Image (cartoon, rainbow, N blue to C red):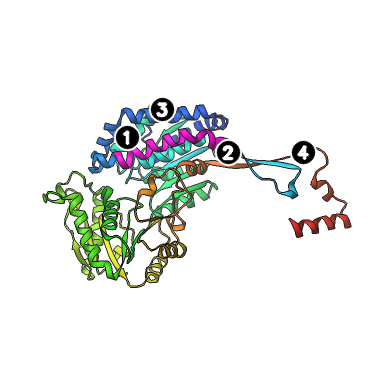
Amino acid sequence: MDFQLSPKNTSAFSQIFDSQYQTALDWRRSSFEERKNRLIKISKWIKSNQERIRQALIDDFNKPSIETDLSEIFPVTSEINHALKNLKSWMKPKKIKTPLAMASTSAWVQFEPKGRALIIAPWNYPFNLAIGPLISALAAGCTVMLKPSEMTPATSLLVQEMVSSCFKPEEVAVILGDATVAEGLLSLPFDHVFFTGSPQIGKVVMKKAAEHLSSVTLELGGKSPAIVGASADLKDAAQKIIWGKLVNCGQTCVAPDYILVHESQQELLLSELKIAIQQFYDPYYKGIEHSPDYARIINDKHFQRLTGYLDDAIQKGAQVAFGGKANQHHRYIEPTLLIGTEESMSINQEEIFGPLLPILSFSEIQEAIDYINRKPKPLSLYLFNQDKSEQQKILQHCSSGNAVINDCVLQFLHNEFPFGGVNNSGIGKSHGYHGFLAFSNEKGVLKQRIGLTNVTLLRPPYGIKTKQIINSLIKWF
């Protein structure tokens, strides 16, 4: 069945949504075995279609197949394997302690699926960021309507094929279309909405969800800093920053957006960054544009956005320390290092989401802390140094969704990690157990014994004895 719908055909959204109502009620009682089998269906499909996934990413934005394996396929299969190993434990009711004032009761937390979920996936990791949340939703026992990005048509069609071969529409349905389709879906009263994208669109999603009081998980982005301190191993830091920045051609929500480096290390770091770019993407000096390991910008709109940032920075006095070349026909932008950028430049105001990397310096660590704190809270913060007291100071004084010391980007691959942002960079956490919780209602259940209980003595008519008991509760409990 084809769910490629137009804005004028939004009644079809409601039909699919309504068809999932009974399934959601039935799945509320689903067992571990039933949920496990749903995940295994996806796992088997992926294993049988890896080459097709690679080709779809090549068709969409020339993504290197190794990067597809590492950043699209592996995170999903790892998420499935982790869920299969732990889901039975996650689903079990969790007993909670009984305070003395509630001595006649027992209590536990029971996990139930929230119900019908909507997942809106982005274009930058179109397979990973569509199927990863789907794994969490299915593990929790939710039905799903999944809207992949229209900017990656090859991958989106493949996701639709995968889902339709594994599930009935009343269980999981993929809806293709543009922003107007997403808007139509958001008009429905889903029990949970999982959105990955920009903070600007995240605000729209949250506003729409609020009309139905739907809970949300928002995985957004922002300007994630990489601090390189005076005690950093510069070669190590440069190689890790360059890989984290340029994987997927910089189109990664957790990529380091800019560098803050101690002034004593700026020149040496710049040299190591250039060496790392050359080693990774042009080891035989044939030109980075010929590298089979370097992806392309997703479309002309984003190419123009990025070259606009670069032109604006140069016109206002920034210097290109490396790179700067661009080819619109191939949507190719060379890895570019910039120094001398100012706050008035667009590149220091907007999330870059591309292979442009401004480098700023500081003389005291407090300057770096203050600079970060003047901006909205980032999704990730990366710190490269060997000074433990400085590490602790930055972790205590800078708020971010996640933080990584002496590496970057790898936190996304950690199954036990509560991945997500804070405020402008996101709401809620995902991956592993935290993804299971995102799509689950943690229902507290309290069981009272029959007959005489602690509360019996607090019933009307109130008297001096009741007052004495309450005073004791206030004082001691």
Q: Earlier in the sequence, mark 4 or mark 2?
A: 2
Q: Specify the segment rendered in magenta.
A: 69-94
Please identify, in this view, whether the residue under mark 4 or under mark 2 is nearer the observer. 4
Which mark, residue 157?
Answer: 1
The residue tagged 4 is 449
Q: Earlier in the sequence, mark 3 or mark 2?
A: 3
Does residue 213 sit above or below 28 in this rendering?
below
Q: Position of residue 170 (x, y in %)?
A: 47, 30
The residue tagged 2 is 111
Q: Residues within 10 Å of mark 4 (few under 14, many from 20)?
A: few
Q: Secondary structure at mark 1?
A: helix
Q: CA distance from mark 3 to mark 1?
A: 18 Å
Q: Earlier in the sequence, mark 3 or mark 4?
A: 3
Q: CA distance from mark 3 to mark 2?
A: 23 Å
Q: Are marks 1 and 4 in contact (CB under 8 Å)?
A: no
Q: Earlier in the sequence, mark 3 or mark 1?
A: 3
Query: Three-letter amino acid code at disc 1?
Result: Leu
Which mark, residue 41?
Answer: 3
Q: Earlier in the sequence, mark 1 or mark 4?
A: 1
